[in-house]
Image (tube, rainbow, N blue to C red):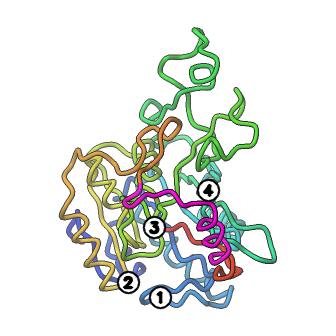
Amino acid sequence: MPRLNAIYNRDCVKGLRQLESDSVELAFADPPFNIGYDYDEYDDRRESEDYLEWCETWLTEIHRALRPDGTFWLAIGDEYAAEMKVMMQQKFGMTCRSWVIWYYTFGVNCKNKFSRSHAHLFHMVKDAENFTFNVDAIRIPSARQLVYGDRRANPAGRLPDDTWILRPQDLPEGFSAEEDTWYFPRVAGTFKERAGWHGCQMPEQLLGRIIRSCSNPGELVVDPFGGSGTTLAVAKKLGRKYLGFELSKEYAQNIRQRLSGIQEGDPLDGAAEPLTSAPSTAEGRRLDASSAKKKRARKSKEAPDQPSLPGL
């Protein structure tokens, strides 16, 4: 078993094989989506059959390492969401507790199709009757509280829905009693939270909800695709043990530096209550109308006809 509370510059399959069986409470994986993204070390242009065989290999090791009451979250794009869900259920016998859609609006602008503005998050458990789900750790204000000021509202709030929205103002009709949703901003290039050395980064508040709800302090959280280190950073802040693997030597070193600046109990980056606030930017500024129009036109010409990858 590798030393805990560390990130290893190691292929995820080789790393996961070193984990003891039934030893991990929570695993979160945000693998390459096989859409041609330019990673530091990994080739994101596999044949479909090869990609799915590779996914089955590392999923086998995650499933083996999970405790009988363990939980696995998978972030994946449209291209292989259906195949991965079927594989996890039929090949590994896991149960899907929730199929979460994370909606955002800062994706790459596409020319010949509707712009990608979402990712899939599968909440899977080994045992459908025995798993961790800390309800009170993730409650949010209800519409009765926020909109109607209804005294019948539970003051503790309610559980989030399974669609996570970037900003409430992006919904054309606003929120109704039936439409309370999760939303977390993508970590845009101007956000103070941005690591700056990795093109794909998920927000800490999103990982915070997953880790708080599906693990307890002192338990082990594993991420086989370290990326920018968000999973491990949030696990450390929330008092969990953590372990990660990263193929890129440069990324692994950057993750170590990020973790070295974190203490248990530190607040998560990003808006703590996204329904009422938004993340600040490092160099926020207002553009005049002509400058804004030119900037939009330039980005539209430069953007490839390819979805953005939220990633870690």
Q: Which tag is nearer the camera, tag 3 or tag 2?
A: 3
Amino acid under label 2? Leu
Q: Image point 52% across, 79% down: which residue?
A: 57
163 or 26, which lies in front? 163
Q: Residues within 10 Å of mark 1 (few under 14, many from 20)?
A: few
Sequence-earlier tag: 3 or 2: 3
- Front residue of this view, candidates 173 and 261: 173
Tell me which corner region of the image, top left, top right, bottom left or bottom right, holds residue 291. bottom right
Marks 3 and 2 in Cβ contact (< 8 Å)? no
Label 4 sits on what residue type? Tyr
Tell me the mark number nearer the camera, choosing from 2 and 4: 4
Q: Kindly identify which numbered label has been placed on residue 142.
A: none
The alpha-carbon separation of the residues under discs 1 and 4 comes to 26 Å
- What residue would you read off at disc 1? 42
Q: Secondary structure at mark 1?
A: loop
Q: How many angstroms separate mark 1 from mark 2 (CA)?
A: 7 Å
Give residue 176's position: percent from left, percent from top.
71, 29
Q: Which mark is residue 247?
A: 2
Q: Earlier in the sequence, mark 4 or mark 3?
A: 4
290 left or right of 250 in image: right
Mark 2 to mark 4 CA distance (whole Å)? 28 Å
With respect to residue 270, does 133 lie above or below? above
**Is residue 76 or residue 188 the one in the foreground?**
188
CA gap between label 4 and label 3 equals 14 Å
Seen from the viewer's position, the closer of residues 298 and 82 is 298
Span of residues in magenta = 281-299
Question: What is the crowding at mark 2: few (fewer than 14 residues within 10 Å), some, or many (at least 20)?
Answer: some
Type of amino acid at the residue the image marks with label 1: Tyr
